Image (spheres, rainbow, N blue to C red):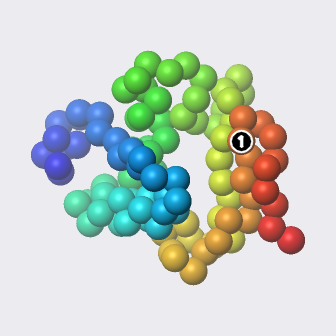
Amino acid sequence: MLKVVKIGCKVFYHERSSCHLQRNLFYSLKHLLLIALSRAQAISKITREPAEIIGAQNIGEVRQGFKASFVVWSGDPFSLASYLALVVAEGDVVHESR
């Protein structure tokens, strides 16, 4: 996998089960860190790169003109102790911890 990433191939992780999505994404991100990707590169594998691979427009990044879907964590997103503080889906706040 590391060789594939280092030569510039786009690779992404996809999770089929929404039931365990947070924990599975956590482990997928940890795996990407273990193969020497930076945090930014690892996060890109579950955000921007999947959108680019499927040819989706205006998703995958938080920037003007894009459909904003993102989460804000209470702490380090790579820590299982962190929890969701804010969830925004296509520009609408759908969850906010109090």
Question: Can you identify the residue that label 1 sits on?
Answer: 89
Q: Is residue 48 left or right of residue 36?
A: right
Instruction: Say whether residue 28 is left or right of residue 8.
Output: right
What residue is at 54 percent from the left and 34 percent from the top? 60
Residue 39 appears in the rendering: no
Task: State the residue in front, 21 or 38.
Answer: 21
Residue 73 showing in the rendered view: yes
Quarter of the C terminus within the rendering: bottom right
- Please rate how many residues cluster around mark 1, counting C-alpha atoms within 10 Å: few if below 14, some from 14 to 19, many from 20: few
Residue 10, image x, y percentages: 29, 34
Q: Residue at x 68, y 65 (%)?
A: 84
- Residue extending furthest left? 3
Residue 8 in the figure: left or right of residue 77: left
Q: Where is 38 relative to 73, above or below?
A: above
From the top left corner, tell me how far across and down residue 45 is, in percent: 39, 44
> Residue 62: image x %, image y %?
64, 37
Q: Tell me residue 30's x, y (percent).
A: 36, 66
**Residue at screen point 66% across, 27% down:** 66
**Near-viewer residue (79 or 25):** 25
Q: Residue at x 47, y 36 (%)?
A: 48
Callout count: 1
Would residue 65 appear left or right of 36 to someone viewing this image? right
Q: Amino acid at mark 1?
A: Ala
